[in-house]
Image: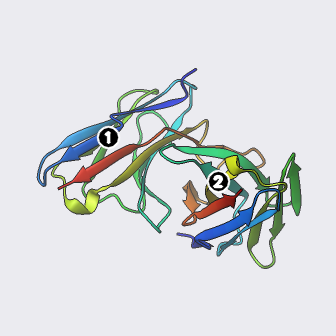
Amino acid sequence: GEDVEQSLFLSVREGDSSVINCTYTDSSSTYLYWYKQEPGAGLQLLTYIFSNMDMKQDQRLTVLLNKKDKHLSLRIADTQTGDSAIYFCAVDQTGANNLFFGTGTRLTVIP
Amino acid sequence: NAGVTQTPKFQVLKTGQSMTLQCAQDMNHNSMYWYRQDPGMGLRLIYYSASEGTTDKGEVPNGYNVSRLNKREFSLRLESAAPSQTSVYFCASSLRPVGTSGTRTDTQYFGPGTRLTVL
């Protein structure tokens, strides 16, 4: 399988930017995803990036991919209290029919 | 469209009891998955079904069985529950198996989860 790592916790003040980081081990990953999980709910796809891209922007979300370092990040601009949730990084792997998930980063937004 | 639905939402079992978790999707997806989520460990794949009529083991299949009843439904069975199976179980589906479609992503859509406690 593939190892996907994230830090467990992040706290930011409302209005600041949040940056959630993720590292992975398999350089053959084609698609890399960010999912959001609110309390008591399932996982909701936020965004994804194809491996031949360095950056993808979608409204307040910016995904950066450093394929050389196998590092993925999610930046949330103007973070709001509604952004408080657990954020999961997930990657695919050539030949594997499933996604590999990180441990999740719990983002807490302080009003 | 309801997307991916799971039943039950909560369940408490005693060690040794059996139960079946149900999952259904109405998106005409070919592939379905069962994951478990444990604190500090992310999601781990139990079983998946790349297409109707096929099932394969994932990372943590021991103690579980699955049935792909038809294209819509994929159930997960615990034959003899153990405390180590206390977890939150998520079902997911995608149009095609993840990682097989070249330049097109095969996004997985998740159900709301089943919280299972085994005493």
Vertically, is A23 above or below B72? below
- As shown in the figure, which amino acid type bears the numbered disc 1? Phe
Q: In the rendered structure, the residue with mark 1 lies on which chain?
A: B
For residue B21, side relative to residue A99 (left or right): left
Residue A59: x and y in percent read 87, 45
Q: Nearer the viewer, residue B86 or B48?
A: B86
Question: Taking B77 as reference, is B119 left or right?
Answer: left
Q: Picture quarter containing residue B84? A: bottom left
Q: Residues within 10 Å of mark 2 (few under 14, many from 20)?
A: many
Label pair 1/2, CB-CB below 8 angstroms: no
Q: Please tell me whether mark 2 sits on a helix, a strand or a loop.
A: loop
Residue B34 in picture, x, y percent from top left: 42, 47
Q: CA distance from mark 1 to mark 2?
A: 24 Å
Chain under numbered label 2 = A
**Number of dots carrying numbers:** 2
Query: Residue B10's mark?
Result: 1
The disc placed on residue B32 is: none
Image position of B75 with respect to B58: above or below: above
* Quadrant in which residue A32 is drawn: bottom right
- Residue at the (81%, 66%) spot, across then down: A65
Q: Amino acid at mark 2?
A: Ser
The label on residue A84 is 2
Q: Nearer the viewer, residue B100 or B82?
A: B82
Query: Taking the image as drawn, is residue A91 in sight?
Result: no
